[in-house]
Amino acid sequence: MIHKCLFPVAGYGTRFLPATKSSPKEMLPVVNKPLIEYAAQEAVDAGLTRLGFVTGRGKRAIEDHFDMNYELEDQIRGTGKEDLIQPTRDLIEACEFSYTRQKEMKGLGHAILTGETLIGDEPFAVVLADDLCIADGDGVLMQMVKLFRQFRCSIVAVEEVPDDHIHQYGVVAGEPLKDGVYRITDMIEKPSKEEAPSNLGIIGRYILTPDIFDVLRETEPGKNGELQITDALKKQAQEGCVLAYRFKGRRFDCGSIDGFVDATNHCYEKFYKNGL
Ligand code: G1P
C-alpha cells in the first residue's frame, strides 16, 4: 500500500517576489495556514504519514514549521492560542518527516528522481503544494489512493483547462475507462493550444509506481531543457498503464496571484469566517 508522499519544494516562486525573496513560496499563508501544511494535511487524510521533502537553498522554514518550537509553546501555554496550533501539533505527531536537497533545478522529473532516496521501492504520491485542492468528503489524494487500490498503476489528477492556459500544463489524451477515469494514450508537457491533445491538464497530484525512477533515469531532458515527469509517465503509459483522473473538488493555482487570491477568499468563506 501507499505510505509515502513526496513534496518537491525546491522552486523559487519568482512570481511572488518580493514575498519569496527569503521565504519559501510554500510557506505563504492562505488565511492563517501555510500552503505546505494544507498539502501535508491532505496526505495525512489519505493515510500517508511518511512525508519526504525535496528542498533547496532558502527552504529551512519548512523544516522548522514541522518541528516543535519550545519557546513559542512556552509562551502560549494555557492561552486560547493553543487551539490555533493544535492541528499543526497533531500533524507533527502523526508523521515522520525526511528531507533531501535538490542541488540544481532541472525540472519536476529531476526533483522526483532526487526524492528516490526518501522513497525507495514502493508506490508513492507526489503533491505540488502550490496547487491547493479543497474537496467536500474525501480529499483529492484520498480519491486517488482509492483508485490506486483498484488499478495499481500510476495516476495523474487532471482538470479541464481553458485554451489560453493550456501551455502551462502537462496535457493528456486518453480513452475513457469509467466515470472520470481515462487510460492515457498520449501526454505532452506544456503544448501550444494547437498541439494540445485535449483540454485535460495535469494538476499537482500524482501517484507513481517506483519503476518511474528507472524510467526517469533513461528520459532525456524535454521542454525547457528540463527532465519532465510528463515525458517519463508517457513512457510508462506506452509500456503499461497510466490513468488520468478527473478529481472531485476545486483546485486553486496558488502559484499565480489570481489563484492565490481566489483560494484565500474561498478558504476564508469555507473555514474561517464563522470563527477563527
Ligand atoms: C508542473 C508539471 C506540469 C503540471 C503542473 C501542475 O509544471 O510539469 O505537467 O501540469 O506542474 O501544476 P510547473 O507548474 O511546475 O511548471
Image (spheres, rainbow, N blue to C red):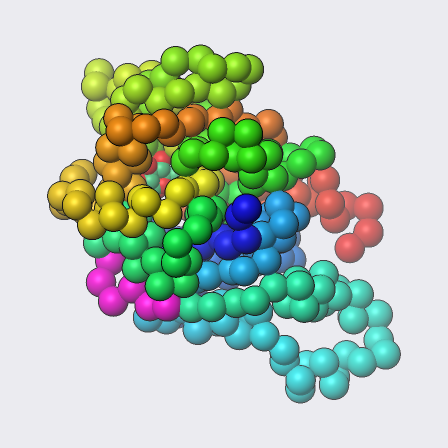
Q: Which residues are magenta?
A: 100-105
What is the magenta segment's predominant secondary structure? loop
The image quadrant where one finds ligand 1 is: top left
Q: Is residue 62 visible?
A: yes
| Residue 28 in picture, x, y percent from top left | 51, 58
Q: Is residue 248 above or below residue 30?
A: above
Instruction: Based on the picture, tell me whether residue 103 belongs to the magenta stretch.
Output: yes
Rendered image quadrant of residue 144: top right
Instruction: Based on the picture, tell me whether residue 142 belongs to the magenta stretch.
Output: no
| Residue 248 in picture, x, y percent from top left | 59, 27
Left-right relation of 57 to 223: right
Q: What residue lies at 56% left-to-right and 67% top-to-bottom?
A: 96
On-image quarter of the C terminus = bottom right
Left-right relation of 252 to 221: right
Q: Nearer the viewer, residue 92 or 70?
A: 92
Q: Is residue 130 visible?
A: no
Q: Is residue 267 above or below residue 185?
A: below
| Residue 34 in picture, x, y percent from top left | 57, 58
| Residue 251 in picture, x, y percent from top left | 53, 35
Q: What residue lies at 47% left-to-right and 57% top-to-bottom?
A: 26
Number of marks: 0
Q: Nearer the viewer, residue 145 or 21?
A: 145
Q: What residue lies at 44% left-to-right and 13% top-to-bottom?
A: 176
Q: Nearer the viewer, residue 85 or 275?
A: 85
Q: What residue lies at 35% left-to-right and 63% top-to-bottom?
A: 117
